[in-house]
Amino acid sequence: EVQLVESGGGLVQAGGSLRLSCAASGFTFDDYVIGWFRQAPGKEREGVSCISSNDGTTYYGDSVKGRFTMSSDNAKNTAYLQMNGLKPEDTAVYYCAAGSSCDAGPLIKSVLVWGRGTLVTASS
């Protein structure tokens, strides 16, 4: 079964850090890019970051540049999102997705599969 499973969300005070994980199974991890997206209540889904598993090239949305870092471990079929300096406006459900290529920065073309999401709450 093609699947992505996110973990690592939780409640943190503003200024704190969290690391999200996105574990892949059922497909060849190296053949796809992985992206992180988020959706806050009442808002549209926003692209956060995208990484190419082949060469590690990463792209970030303007709202997270300099605070979030995306990485991947091909041996573990897992991508990560290190989030530092969290702000209340970062509060959202975070999803990862696998696709054919990163597009227009932190977006993804031809999505293969979405994860179910993990909730991140940064309190003020």
Image: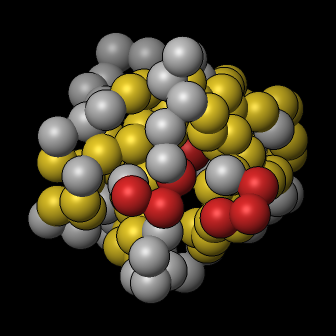
Query: Horizontal and vertical percent for residue 94?
Result: 55, 34
Residue 106's x, y, as percent?
31, 60
**In the figure, is residue 58 to the left or right of 75?**
left
Q: Quadrant of the C terminus?
A: top right
Which residue is found at the position 67% from the left and 52% from the top?
A: 77
- Give the residue at x 42% y 26%: 114
Q: Residue at x 34, y 15 (%)?
A: 42
Name which residue lies at 49% across and 80% down.
56
Q: Is residue 88 left or right of residue 124?
A: left
Between 95 and 92, which is closer to the camera in this rendering? 95
Quadrant housing residue 120: top right
Comparing 103 with 44, the one in front is: 103
The answer to whether residue 16 is seen in the rendering is yes
Image quadrant in which the N terminus is located? top right
* Residue 92 appears in the rendering: no
Q: From what the image shows, is residue 41 above or below residue 75?
A: above
Residue 103, located in which quarter of the rendered image? bottom left
Up-down relation of residue 115 to residue 120 (above or below): above
